[in-house]
Amino acid sequence: MGTLLKVTDLEIRFHIPEGVVYAVNGISYIIAEGETLAIVGESGCGKSVSMMSILGLIPIPPGEIAGGSAVYQGRDLLQLSDVEMEHVRGTDISMVFQEPMTALNPVLTIGRQITESLTTHLGMNDRQAEERAAQLLEAVGIPDGVRRLGDYPHQFSGGMRQRVMIAIALSCNPSLLIADEPTTALDVTIQAQIVELVIQLREQLGMAIIWITHDLGVVAGLADRVIVMYAGYIVEEAEVDSLYNDPRHPYTLALLAALPRADRRRDRRLASIPGAPPNLLIKPQGCPFAPRCQFVLDRCWSDTPVLTPTGSDHGNGHRAACWVNVKTGAPR
Amino acid sequence: MTRYVIRRLLQAIPLLLFISMVLFVLMRNIGDPLATMGGRRVTRSSDRERLTRQLGLDKPLYVQYFYWLIGNDWTKMDLDGDGVAETPGRMRGVLRGDFGTSLVNRGKPVLEVIWERLPNTLLLMITSEVVVILCALVVGVYSALRQYSLTDQIVTTISFFGYSLPIFFIALLSIYIFAVNFKRWGLPYLPAVGMFDPQVGKTPSQVILHMVLPVFSLSFIYLAAYSRYIRSTMLEVLSQDYIRTAKSKGLPRRTIIFLHALKNAALPIVTVVGLDLPFLLAGAVVTERIFAWPGMGRLFLDHVSRADTPVVMGILMLISIAVIVFQLITDIMYAWLDPRIRYD
């Protein structure tokens, strides 16, 4: 499989009255065609921002792309003009957002909101676009698509609206779908349905998916590979099985330990990570996880660890940014 | 929807009755219509007694209101003061479309008095409103898109001046510059008074020329408030999630701004415009006065200062009805703009 998107040393900052927020601090990753990549991390770790920057959706100012590149089909997306970017958004790369209740325009019909992508990007006329829109609605599991085209967002439930958002995102057959916590705002049964729908559509359409989430449970059944982010850094990257069975960064270890599990005693308290995420207003120095880390060494406070292949199985691309071997607690 | 409109119109009836009562009582208590009868000399006391009877001012207030409302042609009036009511009344009452006759204008019917002025006022006010809304949309949307840019700062400063200055100052300043000084400097200058030059006659080009300064003054003041309002509404809408969705779909910028954003921003804007529209009928008292524009504002001022109840009541009731009608139109516009609003 060929490389679809190659992000290198992406740095994003926000200039706010209190100072500079170091939101993303030089992250690099690759996504292959048809691959599903999950990005996990807690709120504010930079996962959404790094994805939105690829589509040019970060308001500049206050945002600033301080460095890096995002090469897609030989072009650096970060260097494209607004008009060039319009032809990438929605057609090559499209996005589904976290909050389905507010992501659709309340005063336009669902039909209008689906067909406008089709008429804009694929040059369809209104009748063709409506036919296709009705098919799309049925494809995402909304029955009676033709009739529902004339309905407005408030006539749909949250789960249905997220299905509509997915229909819009997939309308022009994108090669990459970025899903920014698409199930977070939905209740658990609907979450499972949406994940199921995306898996089914991926099999039909073969697009690559970047799935942003803070729910490690969802990741297991969906992703090929996982990136763990903390404070604007990628701290670990691995195939999904390798990450769950053999976590190599103290943060990932702590995250997995915090998962509720059916095979543990119910009266035990859930594990949590002591401390709080770092203040992103301070220019990072050393390892960002050091203050909360149980394995912390002296050098963690001064040297920022880089993402390097670890363990005996270098070949499968399991990488972690840590000075410590978490199995032994010894320096690497 | 039809049922909703009918219900709203029925609800308006008691409201209008109540408004008319309050206004009638206030009008009868703010001045003496007989003081000069519109002339320059004080009315003689011998005439005063006769006029009081003839105009029905000797009756108790509630009877006067009653006559104003339903007329007095079903009863006889005592006009000569001999204690015998022998002359049949001639008022048919507001409910039958008779707003009575002006007290100070030698018995001219109220509707005729108003009708002479209303077109002039509508011409001036509608032109200003259209200019204001169009300019405010351009300015408001532009400065929302370029928030905190140099242009936005300049426009904001100018609107702040416009909002703070009293209209008479703008009016007099514009006369001073464009009429007085332009004439002195030998430049083509604008007329400052009236609707047309009597020597040329009431031609369309004359009227347009005479409208420039009053329309400019009125627009300058209201432009500030409207454009600030549109700017803040647009800013709020542009930060919504669905605008980010529209961007992520790769829609052209103008579709995002003029369809996705403006249709959402239209609702609060329509509310404000809907509240302002009925007062277009009232005219602009100060502006019409300064530019000697023969409109409703001046009519109102002239007649209220002489306590001419029928004419003032006519104007006020016209405005009250307009307020109710425009509120209804605004509500119908809501339902048209926002599918979430339904009146069933």
Image (cartoon, helix red, strand yellow):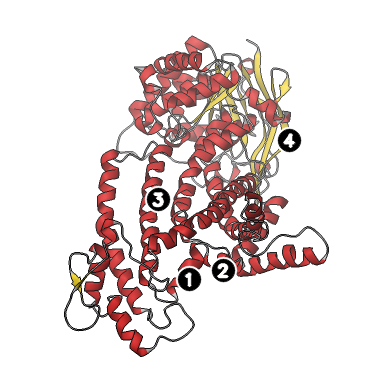
Q: Is there one chain holding both mark 3 and mark 1? A: yes
Depth check, mark 3 against mark 1: the one in front is: 1
Depth check, front residue: B35 or A59: B35
Residue visible at 59% across and 59% down?
B218
Cα gap from disc 4 to disc 3, whole angstroms: 56 Å
Question: Callout 4, which amino acid?
Answer: Gly
Report in which chain the residue with disc 3 lies. B
The residues bearing labels 4 and 2 have C-alpha atoms spaced at a distance of 64 Å
Q: Answer yes or no: do the residues labelled 2 and 3 have beta carbons within 8 Å?
A: no
Q: Secondary structure at mark 2?
A: helix
Q: Earlier in the sequence, mark 3 or mark 1?
A: 1
Q: Tell if the residue under mark 2 belongs to the same chain as the one under mark 3.
A: yes
**In front: A261, or A81?**
A81
| Residue A316 image position (x, y, % from top left) | 61, 16
Q: Provide the residue designation for mark 1.
A: B301
Q: Is residue A219 visible?
A: no
Q: Nearer the viewer, residue B3 or A191?
A: B3
Picture quarter with the C terminus of chain B: top left
Q: CA distance from mark 3 to mark 1?
A: 24 Å
Residue B340: quadrant of the picture: top left
Residue position marked by numbered label 2 in the rendering: B289
B234 left or right of B20 in image: right
Q: Which mark is residue B326?
A: 3
- To the question of a shared chain for discs 4 and 2, the answer is no
Query: Which residue is situated farthest in the bottom direction here?
Result: B45
